[in-house]
Image (spheres, grey):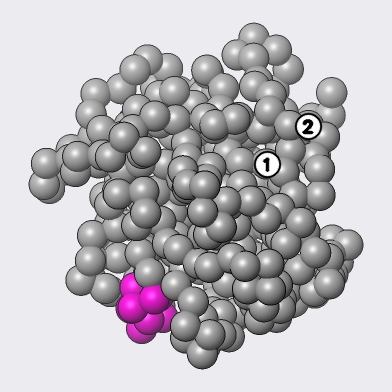
């Protein structure tokens, strides 16, 4: 088994920049609920087959969510971090009541048989592709959902406000850390600081939508997220545009990958940041063709508000 540091560091930096968030310390990878695909396992052109990680087996690492939804394991803790079920984090207001769709595990698709797709965009610290993404969505009259880190929302209040005019802006943590490695109080801080930043920028509560950084979670952090009034949302298909041309992707491959995953209720993961090595914003450039492809196949667009 390769060492944790060898796998995480170079890829995580690239993925974080594409997501737009500052580099976080290396940690373990952890996948979701319906089904719970593993980003370390074999993946199809759009999705991957379900697996789970063992709390006693070898630990795997991931630079960023790949083609599979968030991964879960029963224990992934850094020395010194809380290893017991934590007490609920303190919130300024009572936790929001979660809908049945958001109550269990990590949601990876909108439960529907209709031909609708939910486009979602993660926003960390970098915003290189955000103006293009927002302009395309507005021009095409396509709703979408967003997940912003607190650092992004505080540094880009105008862009965050524009996102909120198009669709819901969920919580993506403050600094995009590996949450299973943090103490309960640190997780609570990541959630509450980001909620305040999004509220300040948009006037709207990001609850009940949360996306785990890197798609990493375990039963402890999922419980903390739920106790804070959030449901966790993963994805059906990752565009992999965050890899950039230096990671073997292109506009054509991003378009093909996303459209190959068409299915009713599909949740698509894309990013508004740029790859740090080649500075490409493949998701932003591919977006018009992705929208056209869905429409040609008879699909319309929804937001994560369908999960409320």
Relative to 296, 97 lies left or right: left
Relative to 152, 189 lies left or right: left
To which residue does mark 1 refer? 68
Relative to 119, 157 lies left or right: left
| Part of the protein shown in magenta | 158-166
For residue 26, say whether it is visible.
Answer: yes
Residue at 30 percent of width and 49 percent of height: 308
Q: Which is the main secondary structure of the residues drawn in magenta?
A: helix
Residue at 40 percent of width and 56 percent of height: 304
Residue 253: image x %, image y %? Answer: 83, 65
Residue 222 lies in quadrant:
top left
Q: Image quadrant for the N terminus?
A: top right
Q: In this view, does 175 lie above or below 18?
A: above
Are dots 1 and 2 in contact, CB under 8 Å?
A: yes
Residue at 76 percent of width and 68 percent of height: 255
Badge 2 crowding class, 10 Å Cα cut-off, few under 14, some 14 to 19, many 20 or more, is some
Q: Is residue 242 above or below residue 7?
A: below
To which residue does mark 2 refer? 41
Residue 129 lies in quadrant:
bottom right
How many angstroms separate mark 1 from mark 2 (CA)?
9 Å
Residue 248: image x %, image y %? Answer: 88, 62
Circle 2: element type: loop
């Amino acid at each position: 088994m390769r060492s944790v540091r060898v796998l995480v560091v170079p890829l995580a930096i690239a993925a974080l920049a594409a997501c737009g968030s500052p580099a976080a310390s290396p940690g373990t990878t952890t996948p979701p609920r319906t089904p719970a695909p593993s980003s370390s396992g074999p993946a199809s052109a759009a999705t991957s087959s379900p697996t789970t990680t063992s709390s006693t087996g070898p630990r795997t690492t991931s630079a960023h969510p790949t083609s599979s939804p968030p991964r879960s394991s029963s224990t992934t803790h850094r020395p010194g971090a809380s290893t017991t079920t934590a007490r609920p984090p303190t919130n300024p207001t009572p936790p929001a009541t979660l809908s049945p769709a958001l109550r269990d595990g990590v949601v990876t698709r909108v439960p529907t048989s209709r031909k609708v797709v939910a486009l979602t965009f993660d926003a960390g610290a970098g915003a290189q592709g955000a103006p293009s993404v927002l302009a395309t969505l507005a021009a095409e009259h396509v709703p979408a959902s967003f997940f912003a880190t607190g650092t992004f929302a505080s540094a880009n209040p105008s862009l965050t406000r524009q996102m909120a005019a198009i669709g819901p802006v969920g919580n993506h943590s403050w600094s995009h850390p590996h949450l299973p490695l943090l103490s309960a109080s640190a997780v609570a801080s990541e959630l509450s600081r980001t909620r305040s930043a999004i509220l300040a920028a948009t006037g709207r509560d990001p609850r009940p939508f949360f996306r785990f950084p890197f798609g990493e979670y375990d039963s402890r952090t999922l419980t903390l997220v739920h106790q804070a009034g959030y449901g966790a949302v993963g994805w059906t298909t990752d565009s992999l545009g965050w890899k950039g041309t230096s990671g073997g992707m292109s506009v054509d491959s991003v378009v093909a990958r996303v459209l190959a995953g068409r299915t009713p209720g599909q949740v698509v993961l894309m990013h508004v940041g740029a790859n740090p090595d080649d500075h490409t914003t493949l998701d932003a450039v591919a977006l018009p063709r992705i929208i056209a492809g869905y429409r040609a196949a008879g699909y319309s667009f929804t937001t994560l508000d369908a999960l409320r």
